[in-house]
Amino acid sequence: VQLVESGGGLVQPGGSLRLSCATSGFVFSNYVMRWHRQAPGKGLEWVSTISSDGGFQYYAPSVKGRFTISRDNAKNTAYLQMNSLRPDDTAVYYCAYGDDGPRGQGTQVTVSS
C-alpha cells in the first residue's frame, strides 16, 4: 500500500492550493478517502472524507465552504482543493483510506505573508 501526497507549499493568506494523493496497492474505488492535518505542536485533526464513489463529502467545520474534496477512481487519486487559506491552515496534510487505513508521508502547507 502506498499513498503519496503532493501539492503543498507556501501560499499567502487568501490563496489557494490543490493537494493530490496518489495511491497504489489497494482497490481505491472500494474505500472512502480521508484528509487529516497536523499543525505544529498540535494533534492530528480530521479535515474531510469522501465516499468511495465520490457522491458524499464531509468536512470539518473549520474548513467547510473553503475546502473541496474530490477523487478520480480511474486515476486512483484523491484531491483536496483549498481556497481562502488562512494562517491557521498551516499544517502537514495527510491522506488516508478506509476507516482506519494508514496515512501517507504528508505534504507541508504553510500560509503566511
Image (cartoon, rainbow, N blue to C red):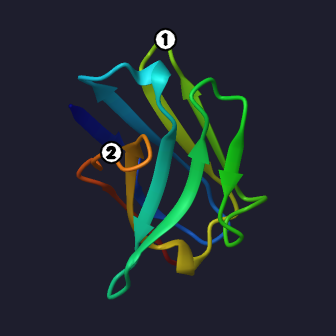
Residue at the (62%, 66%) spot, across then down: 85
Q: Secondary structure at mark 2?
A: loop
Q: Residue furthest front?
A: 99
State whether residue 34 is above or below residue 70.
Answer: below
Give the Cα separation between the discs numbered 1 and 2.
Answer: 20 Å
Residue 12 horizontal side relative to residue 60, left or right: left
- Depicted 79 relative to depicted 95: above or below: above
The three-letter code of the residue at mark 1 reads Ala
Does residue 56 appear left or right of residue 91 in this picture?
right
First reached walking from the N terminus: tag 1 or tag 2? 1
Which image quadrant is residue 77 in? Answer: top left
The residue sitting at 48% across, 52% down in the picture is: 35
Q: Nearer the viewer, residue 28 or 74?
A: 28
Residue on which disc 2 sits: 101
Q: Is residue 4 above or below residue 28?
A: below
Figure quadrant of the N terminus? top left
Q: Which amino acid does the dot numbered 2 rest on?
A: Gly
Query: Is 39 positioned to the left or the right of 68 in the image?
Result: left
Secondary structure of the residue carrying numbered label 1: loop
Q: Which dot marks residue 56?
A: none
Q: Is residue 48 left or right of residue 37?
A: right
Q: Residue furthest bottom?
A: 41
Q: Residue at x 60, y 40 (%)?
A: 50
Residue 20: quarter of image: top left
Q: Position of residue 49 (x, y in %)?
A: 58, 48
Q: Position of residue 11 (x, y in %)?
A: 50, 63
Residue at mark 1? 74
Q: Nearer the viewer, residue 9 or 28?
A: 28
Q: Which residue is rendered at x = 48% and y = 20% of the image? A: 29
